[in-house]
Image (cartoon, coloured by chain):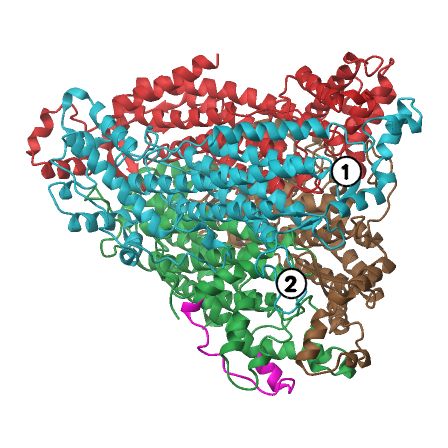
Chain colours: A green, B cyan, C brown, D red
């Protein structure tokens, strides 16, 4: 099932996201939801049997489904008709019975988003590993600490890498907290049709809830109360993805500045011809950082759209806010996966000009140690006491801070093998 | 040249935008820019001749170009190589000489955006015409004026249509003010390579400017100073498109509320099976308004991204902000075109339940005329004076306000035949 | 210390937030940070003693500090000068030694934000309690389930209250996850000046870290590595506050719709003259829901600004992004506190018209049970089987879903006594 | 009338906006609206006379009005009661008769926004004048053209100033296009109460429209149809203000980069102690650019909130979207005025290090002229032809482009004396 081109002239690098959140992937995920529900119906003896839905819809059906989606407001009406028409066996007629289209749309999206999160987490692992190496290797690599663009006090590149690492781990923690919940509630979140099918008055709805729990389990998702117009789980995904692009954006900003020729402390990894110019043969543009910064700029408003859709939710299903989520999640999901891959490549191959860092810092040494002088004078010490300290480079607590970041990373990495 | 599916499961109705701002359209527009520049070079005698670029790149080239776009940071490097390789004639080697990739990317986008604006304007015409009819036909159709959700004073549906119309005309005015400018500045906006090619010292750069002006004219675009990092023309497009989705969003909000069964004053046009439910056979959902509201919710953050990209512009070409514009413009452009078409359909077929409007208003008549009573008492008039006025329905200046809106619309329509 | 008016013509209800995040509160919090640091210096024997900073700066100093803040880029330079000038005792000269202004600005903001979170959590408790009552009391209160504005299947108002409750608890969980971290890193996050003061080479920076940990503990904040340009903790606060306004916005949207006179199922609590009109004596506008919806619309873009500031963080201190956070956090913080209070009032006094809910549902009964009929027919049952079920009102699993929400709320309430 | 502190610890520099859009200014503007309407009523003979409202409400009334504004949903109810209570003469009882509170709120805001626009335009004049000087003075000041952070081809600082100027003029054009419209429509936009007061059936509403037109004229505002839920004029203000902050943000970004010590081509104007550090005596931080960038980052989401409020407008007055506009406009308005003043100061005193620009460019000369070499070789010329051209510095069309920008500025300046 392949139709959507997995590359995008408007978003270079898009192919890195592969099948994540393509139209085909969402379609396949929606079919998986119908399958899990049908299996749950059959497993509970409500339906006389199941039916295999594998391969029943193909990429070639997308255009028809998408067109029908406008008429129906979403693509499920057409999908169910196709599946019932094409499936064999006693369960065919039972497809989708008890569900509503939002159940299928939402749970399908959750499956796709979980795939994105899994991919991103794996990239974050690789980034954390690369940063542990950088932080450790460059723990004594003297460089200029810069605040408000100006020279402040000395740092080491290892410390900078450690603070990048802290940002990556914060983003990973946000991702780790995500709960991926199935949405199985029926027309208005009461599971009414499911209970009608179960037709077992004595259980007072309990069996319908069990059906939903069972289908969720088959999909490997958390079971939860229907959330058709309670969208906190959706906004949490957007926030976590944006926390990732924030962390990468910060790294990219540093790389872009520090790879300016006048500074020249960092250089992006050289790829085959990457960063060339259409007219200037000498140029080697920092393309990865540029594209990461692009993602970091574009992500927050998309996460904001999800919050707004949540805030405007109404009734038992929203007319508009819900529909605004789909493409927003797709863009945010794919772009986060693309940026994750680019960030890994950037960090894994980052070139550090240790000599230039030192030379620039030493050239600004009077400024960089002005604070030390003023503190020493304040404390009543002689200037030449300075040279007698172990911290001749005035690096403060850089060493234990680096150690702390590395230790935090190792713990997280071990917990996420 | 066709590859991108012109339908989108994630944005039902997407196919209404047809070829507007597809990858193929942008690619074709970029080729048109190269053609215009090459023709200008040849026309000025700088190049020995031109070459026809028509049909040299195809949809099948998109994947290769998109993949290459990540490496080069944009798709032009690969496009130029393809064109030079495939073109015949003395001009082939002159393709792109004097330009920079941002020139081609930006001017190509401007051509695409102009096509969107043309389409949207034509839909606005149809909407204005429909609203003139509604405002005129229902100038005396009594209905409840509602403020903060509660009954306020009487209005007519014609007046509501007239205020919708005012919003549409304001949006049209924003669109009319857009200038579509070519971007032709060379590597850093100096037209240095163009001047080098022209090699005519005496003109001190003037001939290079003439080349740019000539190419702009061939494309039917305004000639302007290079705007590589001065993006006001881009944000203006985003603002104008969003002004349109705002105006439609407001209409959609009214239709969604007034078509609630408990109110029932408006009904969306019935389409073939539109608005059906996967489980509830009786339902007729207000799908057009729902999808319009979706677009209205999602647009402002995208326009905001364009402003942000503008605000973060730096140097002679930006590393990231510029790149964030492309997909943002595509999404905003296509969605605006889709919504334009849906809004036309909604307004052209809107069903008005005149009797229900009147019945609801009359049932709330005591409330709706409470203001009248208090004003009359204040002015020292007797209650039964009211019945002697010509404005027994307390409609105030509705009539001249409707006339004013219709007159404004007619003027605009005549100016935009 | 009082100067800023705790009311705001531009944001009615602002006074509900009291002293939270006023200029005075932030100033007091910054003084508390300086105090904790000074005490830590003294406690560790680095400084010869502390000094009491209580009452040294007053509201009357605000104008001078604010004016100086432009010149210095932030208000700390002026504040430190004032404190050193006014404090008595051996510690006076030691004020701020070892810190940088961002340490004071950020940790002061964190203290203010924690106060907001505490207030909001207490309101969420009250809301959860009110919703437990509503969900339980109205577990059998039949009403129309509405999707895409149209009648779908029956629900009960208790179920609606239970889904509101679910949203509130999700927001509370987001709030509970927040970590309030002190920012104590010195000029470039190395704690260099602190180490210089400690002047104990053998500890290789360890004592400086201990000083920071000690000051954090005195403030009741978490100790963490410096996060001057790693702003995940800030964005998390914005996201959590917005998760709250989202949840309230959803409730407000339902109340606004359901209190329309044509529906009339809910009414806002009557307050002394609340909701009056300047010209229409009969009107009782849903003011609380209106103002809640206002907050819900305005919050997501502010949270987005925090993400953007995070993504654009650079160097060891950012030039611009960081500065954009302060007023954004203030607006978001105060408004969230205001909305929290309004939401509590709304939920605690919400009037439910049980009879009208039932009447509207019964009037739409054919539509509301169309799904049941089609499911029953599909399952091969006779229409009159329906009346034999215990679920004559077709409420599905509403009962266990309500029970589940109430149980979840009780657990959370017990955990947060 | 003064209470709101015209300085803000959370937004350093706020006092530059003076009285613009303070609570007092808005209150005064709303009183002016009531005055104009009352005068119009009296002038038309509808009211028996007017009354002077000058000085009737004071800053000390703000707290009471703001508190009452929550109850009434807006501050007008309380304001009208105060005015009627305190005014003398036959017109006192006629205050506000015929208006609705939204008329007063909106028209008052429009008056405040017009004041902001006037102030900003005057700053834009000063900036354009400064940039004309910079562009002209530095038309031959060689510097490195930078794209994607890397050296591209040579430019002059005059050309950079000219492109900054182009951005400023685009923003000014956006401001010039704004229409400031009075909002005078009565409870539901029908002018019903005004007509009732006029009580002249024969005119069929015409006299009410004349009253509105007359009041608008007294305020110096455009007369237009009521726009209670048609908010294009509001979003246009937000877009224009943001176009300004975009243009300044771009300048600030360039200054921040070019004033990095490793580049050192530009320096912010030295002010009395501006840019100092709390711990590092040598530092001179680029405070103006930092604060400008802050404004540029924070503005787009606010403009987006206005669009969203417009898109969500409903009925004859919106419940929530409208209320979200007020504080958003205040923040956007004041901040734009602050930034306008800071940008003027920055541009008027910008220090240009001509020698360092030249030295850096010459040091990168091989890279900066790589394009020239490749173009020359392509065109079949000898390398040493280069030295024979008048454009030995490969500056392309910089001269005519600078001339064009200056000419455009002069025309605009002359049109806006």
Look at the image and say whether residue C325 sits in the magenta stretch: no
Q: Position of residue B210 (x, y in %)?
A: 24, 26
Residue at x-position 56% and y-position 33%:
B169
Tell us which disc is closer to us: 2 or 1.
Answer: 2
Is residue B97 depicted above or below C226 in this figure?
above
Q: Mark 1 highlights which residue?
A: D73
Q: Report the side of B143 relative to C244 (left or right).
A: right
Q: Position of residue B333 (x, y in %)?
A: 45, 45
Look at the image and say whether residue A42 sits in the magenta stretch: yes
> Residue D237, located in which quarter of the rendered image?
top right
Label 2 sits on a secondary structure element that is: loop
Chain to which the residue tagged by mark 1 belongs = D
> Residue B274, located in which quarter of the rendered image?
bottom right
Q: Nearer the viewer, residue D273 or D13?
A: D13
Q: Is residue A410 visible?
A: no
Q: Position of residue C152 (x, y in %)?
A: 70, 64
Q: Is residue A276 visible?
A: yes
Label 1 sits on a secondary structure element that is: loop
Q: Mark 2 highlights which residue?
A: A228
Chain to which the residue tagged by mark 2 belongs = A
The stretch in magenta equals A38-61
As drawn, the residue found furthest toward the front would be: B137
Q: Report the side of C410 relative to D405 (left or right).
A: right
């Amino acid at each position: 099932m392949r139709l959507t081109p997995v590359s995008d002239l408007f978003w270079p690098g898009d192919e890195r996201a592969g099948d994540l959140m393509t139209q085909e992937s969402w379609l396949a995920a929606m079919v998986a939801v119908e399958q899990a529900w049908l299996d749950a119906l059959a497993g509970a003896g409500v339906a006389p049997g199941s039916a295999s839905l594998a391969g029943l819809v193909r990429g070639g059906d997308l255009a028809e489904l998408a067109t029908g989606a406008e008429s129906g407001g979403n693509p499920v009406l057409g999908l169910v008709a196709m599946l019932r028409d094409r499936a064999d066996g006693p369960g065919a007629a039972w497809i989708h019975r008890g569900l509503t289209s939002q159940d299928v749309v939402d749970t399908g999206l959750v499956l796709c988003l979980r795939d994105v999160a899994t991919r991103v987490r794996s990239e974050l692992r690789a980034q954390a590993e690369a940063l542990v190496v950088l932080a450790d290797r460059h723990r004594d690599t003297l460089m200029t600490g810069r605040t408000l663009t100006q020279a402040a006090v000395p740092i080491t590149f290892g410390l900078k890498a450690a603070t990048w690492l802290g940002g990556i781990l914060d983003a990973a923690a946000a991702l780790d907290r995500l709960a991926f919940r199935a949405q199985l509630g029926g027309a208005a979140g009461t599971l009414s049709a499911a209970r009608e099918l179960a037709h077992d008055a004595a259980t007072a709805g309990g069996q319908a809830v069990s059906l939903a729990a069972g289908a969720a389990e088959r999909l490997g998702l958390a079971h939860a109360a229907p959330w058709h117009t309670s969208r906190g789980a959706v906004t949490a995904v957007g926030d976590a993805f944006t926390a990732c692009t924030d962390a990468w954006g910060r790294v990219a900003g540093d790389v872009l500045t520090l790879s300016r020729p006048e500074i020249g402390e960092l250089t992006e990894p050289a790829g085959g011809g990457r960063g060339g110019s259409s007219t200037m043969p000498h140029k080697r543009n920092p393309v990865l950082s540029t594209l990461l910064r692009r993602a970091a700029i574009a992500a927050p408003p998309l996460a904001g759209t999800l919050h707004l859709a949540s805030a405007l939710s109404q009734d038992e299903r929203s007319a508009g806010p819900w529909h605004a989520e789909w493409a927003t999640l797709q863009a945010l999901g794919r772009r986060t996966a693309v940026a994750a891959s680019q960030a890994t490549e950037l960090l894994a191959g980052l070139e550090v000009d240790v000599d230039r860092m030192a030379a620039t810092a030493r050239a600004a040494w009077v400024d960089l140690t002005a604070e030390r002088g003023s503190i020493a004078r304040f404390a009543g010490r002689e200037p030449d006491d300075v040279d007698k300290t172990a911290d001749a480079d005035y690096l403060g607590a850089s060493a234990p801070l680096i150690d702390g970041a590395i230790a935090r990373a190792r713990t997280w990495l071990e917990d996420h093998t």
